[in-house]
Image (cartoon, rainbow, N blue to C red):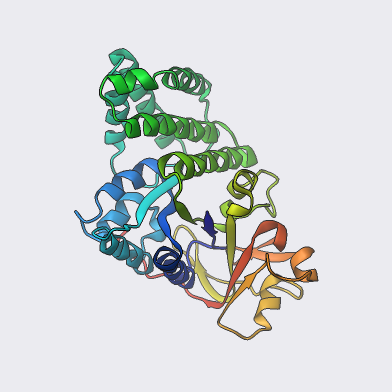
Amino acid sequence: VVQLGESSHGVSEFNHAKVRLIKYLHEERGFDVVAFEGGIWECARADASVGEVAPRDVMARCLFGVWDTAEVEQLFVYLERTRATDRPLRLVGFDVQSSSAYAESERTAFFARVYGAVDRARGDAIAALDTKLTTAIDAASRPPIPLDAELAAYDEHIAWASAQGGALRAAGVSAEDVAFAEQLLRSRRAFCLQWSASGEASSAARDAGMAANLVWLAEQRFPGEKLVVWAHNGHVGYVGGLAAAAQMGSYLRDHFGDAAYTVGLYGYRGATSFNNRLVVPVRRGGPGSLEALMYQLREQAVFVDLRGLPPADWADQTIPTLSWGRTVEPLTLRDSYDGLLFVDTLTPPAYLNR
């Protein structure tokens, strides 16, 4: 598993770099699955539409609007181009959150179809719970909201579903759908837990759920395949800077060990966009910061392999970094990443429709 981070979602150069790296990893290093910080359900449905609808429409069906950009569209053009080859690049998502309204009703119907094959009442109940969770969260402005009853219901349904594999396959449900339905149930429970908690506990629930989805994708859905992950530094990093809660990357490092390689992306100056597309100037890191140190190289782009780097004060001691190009976040870099990609000057991406 190679994870590609980004200190901000709204940076054109990060998008360009990651698209190029993914193409390289697919063409030269045998990585046949790209996993986005997008909904596990939406990305699965969008992947099934590659080659049937335009790349821009595939992208809109599965990604948050922060990546609805001309730069990221080139990755979806590439996805389509590989689909007819003997090594297509597959698209998956690992987020417990919904990243698009696409196929929401299909997810509910999927639960009813799969579990209704052995128990119609159970299938309807799981579908109704899925709808209830969506409705409750859509009506809320932010977590936490009271979801104790829903969490208990998910626990009971997951316990039941995990014992039904043989019966479901005997009833004609494909082994792939049986496995995906159960993981999707677990993912929806993590989403429910995220919205029932507040602050760092909410973030921790999301990251733990995303990590569980990625492990399942790597070991159950695509066993033996190599995955390249696209997400924010704050998810892929092994150790958080400001938050005490464990990040997704910490779970993956514990699970995969050295088979995971994580790259943090940072920049020195220019402008970035927040998730609401507000363009703001990037703060220049102060003396001793990662950004100031990398700037001394006077290169537009620099890659540093922290695994192969000799002992260095700046890599092995806690120093300031900038998250979102604005917020000072102290990190011990070698504890957080395996590599760094530094870009001198950042610009906002070219947004498309959303």
Is residue 60 among the parts visible in the rendering? yes
Instruction: Locate residue 207: give its quadrant.
Output: top right
Residue 84 position (above or below residue 287): above
What residue is rendered at 63% in x and 54% in y? 258
Q: Which of 64 and 96 is in front in this view?
A: 96
Residue 315 higher or lower than 245, as above or below: below
| Coordinates of residue 176 in the picture (x, y in percent) | 34, 34
- Find residue 312 and report its horizontal and vertical position in percent: 78, 71
* Image-based side of 154 in relation to 351, left or right: right
Q: Measuring 29% from the left and 19% from the top, which residue is drawn there?
A: 170
Q: Where is residue 91 in the image (x, y as percent from the top left)?
A: 36, 52
Q: Is residue 213 above or below residue 321?
A: above
Q: Quadrant of the C terminus?
A: bottom left
How many numbered marks does the figure carry? 0
In this view, the residue farthest toward the bottom is 298
Q: Which residue lies furthest to the left in this view?
A: 52
Is 283 on the left or on the right of 49, as rendered? right
Residue 184 percent across, percent down from the top left: 41, 33
Viewer-proximal residue, 167 or 212? 167
Comparing 254 with 150, the one in front is: 254
